[in-house]
Amino acid sequence: MSKNALLFCMCVVVTALCSAAPTASDRIRFDGIGDIKIGQTFDEVSKLWPSEIKPIPPGLKASPDCYHVSPTNHPGVTLMFRHDHLVRIDLTKKTGQTKSGVRIGDDFAVLKRHYQDAVFTNQNSSVEDRQVTISSPDKKYAFRFYFEHSKIASISSGQVDAVALDEGCY
C-alpha cells in the first residue's frame, strides 16, 4: 500500500472515530443540553437550533398546552414544551450522556458511582421497567434514567414535575 493510500485510510478512520464521539450538544444537564436551557420559549430554542424545529399545529398537539418536538439534526433528542416553554428533554441516542459522564447503555453500578444517592423504583409496578430519579442540588430540576434489561435506555432532564411524568405530557 502506498504512503498516500495509508495516510488517506488513517484520516478516514480518525474522522469516523471523532464524529462518533459525543459532542457537547449530546451532554444533557439538569437544566438543558448544549445551548438549550429549560424554561426557554419555543422561539428562543428555535433560534438556537435554526430550521430544526417547527411549530406544531394546535390540532396535532398532545394537549392544548403541551407538545413534543424532535429536532431534525439532533436524532434521539425530544423536547417537551408546556405553554410554549421548554420543560423537559428526552435523550435516547446511544452516544448521549450526562454532563457527569453517565451514558445510555451504562448499568446501575456506573450510575451509582456518579450519583451515590441513586435508588431504583419500578415504573407501573413492573420489575422490568426500572428507573432512577436524581434531583439537582437546588431541587428545581431532575434526571430520570430509564432502564431496560439492566442498562440505561433513555435519560430525561428538566423541571422536576415534567420529568416525573411517565407518559410525557399527560
Image (cartoon, rainbow, N blue to C red):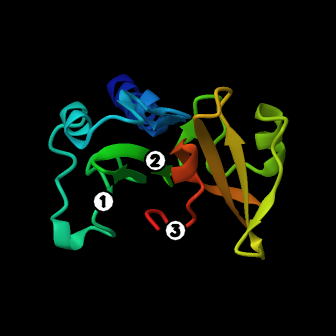
Give coordinates of residue 68: x percent, y percent. Answer: 34, 59
Q: Nearer the viewer, mark 2 or mark 1?
A: 1
Which residue carries the number 2 mark?
Answer: 88
Q: Label 1 sits on what residue type?
A: Asp
Labels 3 & 1 near each other (Cβ < 8 A) = no
With 23 as the anchor, is 50 left or right in this view?
A: left
Nearer-the-camera pick, 46 or 137: 137
- Tell me if residue 56 can be seen: yes
Q: Residue at x 18, y 73 (%)?
A: 59
Q: Nearer the viewer, mark 3 or mark 1?
A: 1
Distance Cα–Cα, label 2 vs label 3: 12 Å
Q: Quadrant of the N terminus?
A: top left
Labels 2 & 1 near each other (Cβ < 8 A) = no
Q: Label 3 sits on what residue type?
A: Glu
Q: Residue at x 61, y 49 (%)?
A: 104
Nearer-the-camera pick, 19 or 42: 42
Q: Label 2 sits on what residue type?
A: Arg
Which residue carries the number 1 mark?
Answer: 65
Q: Residue at x 51, y 52 (%)?
A: 162
